[in-house]
Image (cartoon, rainbow, N blue to C red):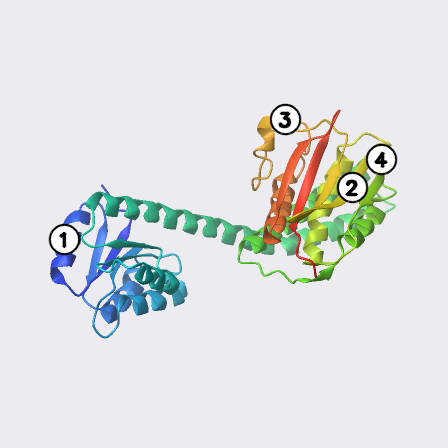
Amino acid sequence: MQKLYKILIVDDDETNCEVLIEILEEHFQLEVAYSGKEGLEKALIFKPDIILLDIMMPEMDGYEVCRKVKQNSSLATTKIILVSAKRMLKDRLIGYEAGADDYITKPYDHNELNAKINVFSHLKYTEELNKLKDDFLTLLTHESKTPLNIILGYSELLSMSSNLSDDEKEFAEAIIKAAQQLHTSSSKTLFLCKLKSNYQLALHRGALEEIIEELIQKYTGNTKNISFKFDYDLAKFLMIDAPIISKSISYIIDNAIKHSNENDVVNVSIETKDPYVIVTIKDKGPGISNENKEIIFGEFNNADIDHHSQGLGISLAIAKRVATLHGGNLTVEDNNPTGAVFKFHILNNIA
C-alpha cells in the first residue's frame, strides 16, 4: 500500500525518534533530523506534510524552527505538531504564537498521536486541493478574457452589418449573449477567488442608504417594470468596503427582479439590530424550498431550484463572503405569502 503522507521527525533525542519511527513507519513516509538546523534543511528538501517537532533542542529550539518553517512559502501548508515534555499553558501559547498547529505532551498516547496525525494529514490535503482549484480557476479566468473580448467585439460588429439576413443577425446576437454570460461568470469567479485569498478590505466611511439609492436608480426602468420601496432607519456612517458591498447587494437585487412578475414591487430596507446593520431585500417570486435554503450559498451551487437559480452559484457565494468579511452574514427566509427574503448583515461599527 502506498504511503501517501510524509512526516518529518525533529528531535535531538535518538530514543524519542526511534519510538516515533516504530509507531509511524508502517503508514507514512518518514525522515528524521536530530537538530533544529538539520530539520529546516530536510524540510526544504523532503517537503513534509507534517513535522513532529521537539521544543528543547540546542542551538535552535523548536519554536525558532516553527517560525522559520511558517515563513517559508514552499512549506506554507505543512502542519506542525509540537511534541514536548513541557506541560505549562504558557509553553503551548508560545508554540501557537510561533505558528504551531497543535501540541502534544510526552509521554504521549499512541492513539492520540495517530489521531492528530490523521486529522492534520487530511487537512493539509484538503487545503492543497482547494488552493489548486482556486489557482486553476484564476488562471482559466485570466486566460479567457482576451478571447472572450475578441468574440464579443467581432460578433457585435457583425450584428450591426446591413448585409446579414434576419437569421444571421439572430445567430450573431446569440453569440453575443453567450459571450456576455461567459464574461460575467469569468469575472465573478475571479472575484470570488480573490475574496478567498486573504482579501484585505479597503475600509472607508460609507453610508448604506446612499449605496442602495444608487442601485435602485440603476435598476429603475427595468424591462419588467419592477418598482422599489425603500425604507431605512440609518442616519450614520459605517466603516465598509463600499464597492464590494454595492456589488454584492446588486446581485441580490438583480436576482429579485429576474424572478419577480411584471409590475411587482421589490422591498428594500435597512435597519439596525445590534450588533448588526441589516439590508433586507424582499421579492414576491416563487420562493425557495427549505432543503435548498441550506445549499444555495455554496460555491458554484447548481441545485435545481425553481427560484434564484441562474448564476447564483457564484453570486450568492460572493455576497455571503463579503458579508462575512464585514463581520456579518447573508441569510434567506420565506416572504409571505410568497417570495424570498435575503438579509445582508454587516457588523455595526459606527464610524
Q: Which mark is residue 36?
A: none
Task: Please tell me how crowded label 3 is: few (under 14), some (14-19), or many (20+) other residues with Cα within 10 Å.
Answer: some
Q: Amino acid at mark 3?
A: Ser
Secondary structure at badge 4 equals loop
Q: Could you tell me which residue is drawn at 70 percent across and 28 percent down? A: 287
Disc nearest the viewer among 2 and 1: 2
Secondary structure at badge 3 equals loop
The residue beneath circle 3 is: 289
Task: Please tell me how crowded label 2 is: few (under 14), some (14-19), or many (20+) other residues with Cα within 10 Å.
Answer: many
The residue beneath circle 4 is: 224
User: Is there a contact, CB below 8 Å, between mark 4 and mark 2?
Assistant: no
* Residue 175 at x, y percent in the picture: 72, 42
Q: CA separation, marks 1 and 4?
A: 73 Å
Instruction: Determine if residue 157 is in view.
Output: no
Q: Amino acid at mark 1?
A: Val
User: Upstream in the sequence, badge 1 or badge 4?
Assistant: 1
* Residue 231 at x, y percent in the picture: 82, 43
Tell me where residue 39 sits by quadrant. bottom left
Residue nearer the viewer, 329 or 1: 329
Q: Is residue 336 left or right of residue 50?
A: right
User: Upstream in the sequence, badge 3 or badge 2?
Assistant: 2
The residue beneath circle 1 is: 19
- Quadrant housing the C terminus: bottom right
